[in-house]
Image: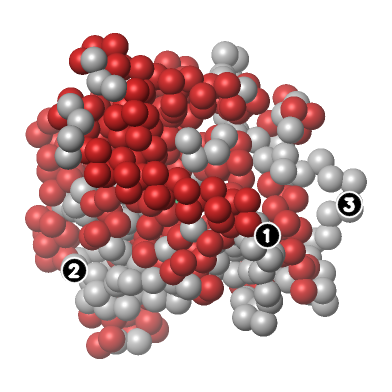
Amino acid sequence: MSQTMTAADQKSPKPKSAAPETKGGDRTSALGKLPSDIGTDYSFKRKIVWKNAIGFLILHLAALYGQYLCFYCHKATVLWATVVAFIGAEGITIGAHRLYSHKTFKAKFPLRLALVILQTMAGQNCLYIWVRDHRQHHKFSDTDADPHNAHRGFFFSHIGWLMSRKHPAVIEKGKDYRYVGFGGRSAGDVPEEVSWYYKPLYTFFAILLPISIPIYFWNETLTNAFFVAYIWRYIIALNATWCVNSYAHLWGTKPYDQFILPVESHFVAFISVGEGWHNYHHAFPWDYRAAELGSKYCFTTFMIDFFAYLGQAYDLKSAPYNLIKNKALRTGDGSHFVFKNKKTKSPEDKLMDGSYLVDPEDEKAYNVGSSLVERSKKILPEVGQRAMTVQG
Ligand SMILES: [Zn+2]
Ligand SMILES: [Zn+2]
């Protein structure tokens, strides 16, 4: 992988592939199609990677044993495992997802370093591969070029994609992301370098550190520490993240875009610390909140606001009121908590009568619902104000 990490590559989002760039793509070949035309070939038979399938089965059985041990081990071990799962999840949601995959804000060196360490602690592969797969997921959502195409069902988009050979379209389209840089790289940045040493860092931060603390500080047994603070914690957090790819692409409402699979899910938002407002996120992936104002369980957004208050995060991007409203009215399924009138007027009528523009009554109702911003304003006055504006 190291040859893919030159400074020149990092500056350029384009692949340094030997193949000539074909503008518009070759639409005559299955793999040269535009993202929206790729679709899903249901006759395609996947080859199971038995090594991965058996590995995941063993890990889940071990996690069940860890669940059993939770009732008998030191209570502090369960608490510690939960804390590790939680901060690892923040490394994924704030770091790998909102900072590195989508560049929804910028972060200073200490925050970037902390996020990369926490992302490593979560054990969801190195940052580079996580970002590559996620950007591909957004560009080719729910087609054969999406690594976890939800059109293939819950099991496949949840875990099945990790235990079967990739579809040729995933491999082909993934080449465009082979050299994708993290962007905005400045002197002293670390993430890519950390990605090179993922395995030793994973061994330390995801295994040794989590199991050493309970043994050292409250004399936990090695067995309890291993199965609870490592295996159980790891598998629970993995499944919470996978639910964003599976559950949040299948069951819920689509207030912003009814023509895509991702949905709004309270359940997934709760277990993934705010990543379940997935219809919004796919509609506005560059919004640091990954949810509209007022959505619940957005702890990750709250943390980014907090880091902004501390000066560690800056240039937060968020979608303006009018853009959200117009999107909801134009393509939503009518389930938006304020903008529900799309079925009563055609888009043309709405353009003509100006109902795409800000309506004071709508805005009032909208702000009453935006508890997150209200909370932000109380706790962090400047950040709450910033969350209401577009940062570019
Ligand atoms: Zn998605
Ligand atoms: Zn995303």
Name the amino acid type tagged 3.
Ala
Q: Badge 3 is on which residue?
A: 19
> Could you give the CA–CA distance between mark 2 and mark 1, rounded to whole angstroms?
44 Å
Q: Looking at the image, which residue is at 48% across and 29% down? A: 120
Mark found first going from the N terminus, 1 or 3: 3
Q: Residues within 10 Å of mark 1 (few under 14, many from 20)?
A: some
Query: Can residue 308 be seen in this snapshot?
Result: no
Identify the image quadrant of the C terminus.
top left
Q: Looking at the image, which residue is at 64% across and 63% down? A: 48
Whole-percent x, y for residue 116 in the image: 48, 26
Whole-percent x, y for residue 276 in the image: 32, 56
Pick whichever, 213 or 242, lies toward us: 213
Q: Badge 2 is on which residue?
A: 338
Pick whichever, 226 or 153, lies toward us: 226
Name the amino acid type tagged 1.
Arg
**Image position of 28 (left or right of 250):** right
- Callout 3: SS: loop
Q: Which mark is residue 165?
A: 1
Pick whichever, 21 or 389, lies toward us: 21
Say if mark 2 contacts mark 3, CB within 8 Å. no
- Callout 1: SS: loop
Identify the image quadrant of the N terminus.
top right
Q: Looking at the image, which residue is at 51% across and 24% down? A: 203
- Callout 2: SS: loop
